[in-house]
Image (cartoon, helix red, strand yellow):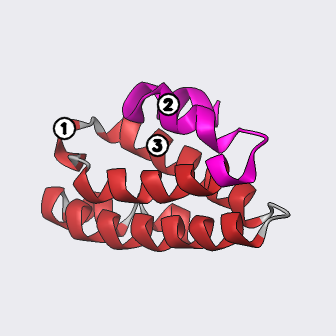
Amino acid sequence: MAAETLVKILGPNLITQVYSKNWQARSKAYNDLSNSLKKFKFDKVPKNDLQDMFIALFSLINMGIADKNKDVNVEAIGLFLTVIDESFKNLSKLDSKFHKTEFGLFIT
């Protein structure tokens, strides 16, 4: 479910790399996801899809933090920080009600 949502929004290449057996590919995928989110147009995605995207991203972040390789762990933490930073920057511009209520579900 998490992968399907992100493939729909971010494309199949990055998501395929996250599930790779090769730790270098996984590490690079988390870094690439962070960079993609910095350029992502949050205002082009419907709110329901955004919520699904955040749930999927946090699922991938959890998977990366639980990875046995420390380089993947570090990149997953970097993705977490990017998600928080970029979402607060962008969602507060879109709809402050969404920012305060629905997104708060992901923080708590």
Disc 3/disc 2 C-alpha distance (Å):
16 Å
The residue depicted at 34 percent of the width and 50 percent of the height is 36
Inspect the magenta stretch and tell me whether residue 100 lies in it: no
Q: Which mark is residue 25?
A: none
* Residue 16, image quadrant: top right
The residue depicted at 57 percent of the width and 44 percent of the height is 56
The residue most toward the right is: 68
Query: Which stretch is magenta?
Result: 1-25
Disc 1: which residue:
44
Q: Give residue 32's position: percent from left, percent from top.
A: 44, 52
Q: Give residue 92's position: percent from left, percent from top.
A: 21, 67
The residue depicted at 42 percent of the width and 29 percent of the height is 11
Dot 3 crowding, Cα within 10 Å, few <14, some 14–19, many 20+:
many
Residue 11 in view, yes or no:
yes
Q: Earlier in the sequence, mark 3 or mark 2?
A: 2
Q: Earlier in the sequence, mark 1 or mark 3?
A: 1
Disc 2: which residue:
13
Looking at the rendered structure, the secondary structure element under dot 1 is helix
Dot 2 crowding, Cα within 10 Å, few <14, some 14–19, many 20+:
few
Disc 3: which residue:
53
Looking at the rendered structure, the secondary structure element under dot 2 is helix
Q: Nearer the viewer, residue 94 or 31?
A: 31
The residue depicted at 28 percent of the width and 35 percent of the height is 46
Disc 1/disc 3 C-alpha distance (Å):
13 Å
Quadrant location of the C terminus? bottom right
Residue 108 in view, yes or no:
no
With 29 as the anchor, is 71 left or right in this view? right
